[in-house]
Image (cartoon, grey):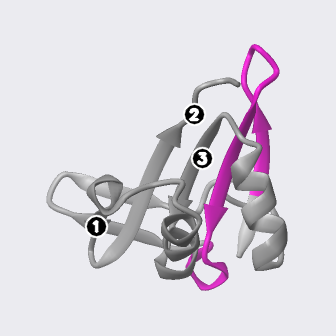
Amino acid sequence: MIVKIHKTEEGKMLLAVCDSELIDKKFEEGKGQLDLTSDFYKGDEKTEIEVSDLMRNSYIINIVGEKSVGLALKEELISEENVKKIDGVPYASAVFQEN
């Protein structure tokens, strides 16, 4: 999985997670679009354990791809109701409350 860490204006972590094989691709369906060609998702390859830890410590996560979304589901960070698809590619976003 590819992970890119962004910071919000308040300094909170916004995490973009994408399956490695989807980087540099664009998916469209109707009016929906997943554009994975921009720098927003272009980050570093991470292990499942590293991604899981980063997701748990993020304020916002944007997730694209079967593996990435599957990990967030497995870790119970999102639920099936959060998952949408464009051109068969699953994606989800989540915002977490501060502790």
32 lies left or right of 75 = left
| Residue at (54% x, 59% y) in the render | 63
- Point out the stretch of residues depicted in magenta: 4-23
Q: Residues within 10 Å of mark 2 (few under 14, many from 20)?
A: few
Label 1, label 2: how far apart the Cα atoms are = 24 Å
| Residue at (76% x, 65% y) in the render | 51
| Residue at (60% x, 72% y) in the render | 24
Q: Which residue lies furthest to the bottom in this view?
A: 21
Residue nearest the viewer, comparing 18 with 80: 80
Q: Name the residue under label 1.
A: 86
x, y percent for residue 54? 79, 54
Q: Which amino acid does label 3 sit on?
A: Ile
- Residue 96: assigned label: 2
x, y percent for residue 26? 44, 68
Q: Mark 3 points at which residue?
A: 61
Label 1 or label 3, whichever lies nearer to me, is 3
Q: What residue type is labelled 2?
A: Phe
Label 1 or label 2, whichever lies nearer to me, is 2
Res 50 seen here: yes
Please say whether residue 74 is one of the residues in the magenta stretch: no
Labelled pair 3, 2 in contact (Cβ < 8 Å): yes
x, y percent for residue 76? 52, 60
